[in-house]
Image (tube, helix red, strand yellow):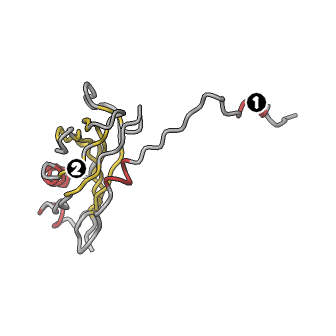
Amino acid sequence: MRQEPDAALFAIPDDYKLFRDTAQQSLARGCGVSDGAPSANSAGSPGFPTTGIAQVGIGGVTAPRCDYCPQPSYSEEARAAKLNGTVVLKIAVTADGRAENAQVVKGPGHGLEQKFIEAVKNWRFTPADGPDGTPVACQVEVEATFHIR
């Protein structure tokens, strides 16, 4: 006969701490969709060079904020195919607020990834703050959703 598992198996340890990663909310500021233009926002992920790069939410590191985020344009190939889809890039945001080292995490192809990389190179950020309040480089994921109306 089955019985309920011991409640102690589901107890939260006393030393458990929850860190809230707010990079997505910070970078999404000011981005939206209009007339077939993609929207942009962000988050974080593995497989990216991390030497000298802080991790948002770890050790008091804040999220960078995108202050200038021009929307990526459609590629001619994607527009002709009437392709909708999402592109996710991993980027490093430098301590002086520039986006570098864009790497494709996922995308539908048809040139949309390259168009997003081109746009992100022009983005400018208020950089992340380290635990001591000074600007630090960090990594985040940014996302653009391409939707043709």
- Evaluate if marks 2 and 1 touch, with contact meaning CB atoms under 8 Å apart: no
- In this rendering, the answer to whether 13 lies above or below 35 is above
Which residue is at the far right? Answer: 1
Q: Position of residue 22 (x, y in %)?
A: 41, 48
Most foreground residue, 23 or 43:
23
Task: Tell me the mark number nearer the camera, choosing from 2 and 1.
Answer: 2
Q: How many marks?
A: 2
Q: CA distance from mark 2 to mark 1?
A: 45 Å
Residue beneath the point at 24% across and 41% down:
91
Most foreground residue, 13 or 81:
13
Q: Position of residue 117 (x, y in %)?
A: 16, 49
Most foreground residue, 140 or 29:
29
The disc labelled 1 sits on which kind of residue? Ala
Q: Position of residue 95 (x, y in %)?
A: 21, 38
Q: Name the residue tied to disc 1.
A: 8
- In this rendering, the answer to whether 98 lies above or below 115 is above
Q: Which quarter shows the N terminus?
A: top right
Quarter occupied by residue 69: bottom left
Residue beneath the point at 72% across and 30% down:
9
The disc labelled 2 sits on which kind of residue? Phe
Q: Name the residue tied to disc 2.
A: 125
